[in-house]
Image (cartoon, rainbow, N blue to C red):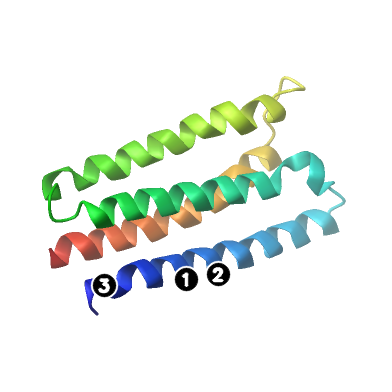
Amino acid sequence: MKQRAYPILFTSILLLGLWGSFFLQSWILENRGHELSSLQLTKSYVLNAIMALIVFFAIYFFRNKYRDLLGFFFLGGSLVKFALFFIFLYPIFNEDGVLERLEFLVFFVPYGFALVLETFFLVKLLNTV
């Protein structure tokens, strides 16, 4: 597969995967009686989607010029994602003083999906550059 197709393929898989994951997770949460608006589920998915796209496109555009630093771009993107989690979501989750497992999963399900996808495409880029 040509590298020119990677951005379209990455974006398609990311958005479709997060969309499917969002609806599956929201369906499970609703069936267990949780109120989705208080869990910040949409905010979590949007934050992870935007950050995954930014990290991927930064890696993609700088793949030739800064080949030796692509791993650091990837790690830096993960650091920024965690920083945004602590800025935007953690204060809401920690209002009662406890970060519950459910609140943890609201962020880390989309984070994990995006992380696996980013890793896969980073490896493909590094093997073909």
- Label 1 – label 3 distance at C-alpha: 14 Å
Does the residue at mark 2 contact the one at mark 1 (Cβ under 8 Å)? yes
- Disc 2 packing (10 Å; few <14; some 14–19; many ≥20): few
- Tell me where residue 85 appears, x and y as whole percent: 55, 34
Question: Pointer 2: what residue?
Answer: 16
Residue type beneath disc 2: Leu
- Few, some or many residues within 10 Å of mark 3 (<14, 14–19, 20+): few
Q: Secondary structure at mark 3?
A: helix
Residue at 80 percent across and 44 percent down: it is: 37
**Rounded to the nearest whole Å, what is the CA distance between mark 2 and mark 3?**
20 Å
Secondary structure under tag 1 reads helix
For badge 1, the amino acid type reads Ser
Q: Residue at x 59, y 43 (%)?
A: 107
Residue lying farthest bottom? 1
Please tell me which of labels 2 and 3 falls first in the chain: 3
**Residue 8, placed above or below residue 102:** below
Task: Give the quarter of the figure containing the N terminus.
Answer: bottom left
Q: Which residue is painted at 78% across and 54% down in the image?
A: 29
**Which quadrant would the C terminus be assigned to in this image?**
bottom left
The image position of residue 62, as x and y in percent, is: 21, 51
- Mark closer to the chain start, 1 or 3: 3
Residue 90: which disc?
A: none
**Which mark is nearer the camera, 2 or 3?**
3
Q: Which residue is mark 3?
A: 4
Q: Which residue is mark 1?
A: 12
Is 35 placed left or right of 110 in the picture?
Answer: right
Q: Quadrant of residue 108?
A: top right
In whole angstroms, how far apart are the C-alphas of marks 2 and 1?
6 Å
Tell me the element at label 2. helix
Give coordinates of residue 66: x percent, y percent. 14, 47
Residue at 57%, 51% in the rendered image: 109
